[in-house]
Image (cartoon, grey):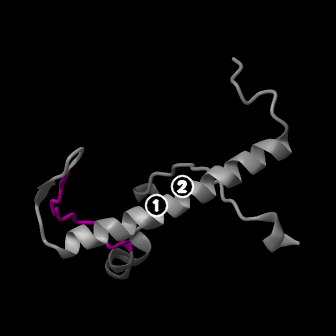
Amino acid sequence: MTNKFDNMSDETLADEIGELNAIIKAHEDRLDALKAAFKARARSIVKGQSWIVTSSTSTTKRLDVKRVREVLGDALDDSYFISSDSTRITTKPVKEIE
């Protein structure tokens, strides 16, 4: 199966990923700041002209593996864990490398 990026050179693909990643990062930083401002106002729902923004809080519980290891020691072996693979793609400007 082919896609629209098949004819793109590796170098062009790297540049496209880096450029888009930089744009998204800048927007994510601004979005995080806006969300922090919204959260600081302690509002649960605000209706703007085009968007409704809601805020809710949830609590999750996570297993403290370090503490479990302290209690169980060697009894906590690899049979208790499930492996999963993930691929991480990172970007940085070429000027930082040179």
Disc 2 to disc 1, how far (Cα)? 6 Å
Quadrant placement of the C terminus: bottom right
Quadrant placement of the N terminus: top right
Q: Is residue 94 above or below residue 86?
A: below
Residue farthest toward the right in the current orientation of the protein: 98
Q: How many residues crowd around disc 1 within 10 Å: few (fewer than 14), some, or many (20 or more)?
A: few
Q: Is residue 97 magenta?
A: no
Mark 2, residue position? 24
Where residue 44 appears, as percent x and y from the top left, is 10, 61
Mark 1, residue position? 28
Q: Amino acid at mark 1?
A: Glu
Side of 67 where 22 appears, left or right:
right
Q: Amino acid at mark 2?
A: Ile
Q: Is residue 57 magenta?
A: yes
Q: Which span is picked out in magenta?
A: 53-65
Q: Are marks 2 and 1 in contact (CB under 8 Å)?
A: yes
Quadrant of the image occupied by residue 5:
top right
**Which secondary structure lies at badge 2?**
helix
User: Which is more toward the observer, 1 or 34?
Assistant: 34
Where residue 25 appears, as percent x and y from the top left, is 54, 61
Q: Residue at x 38, y 66 (%)?
A: 32
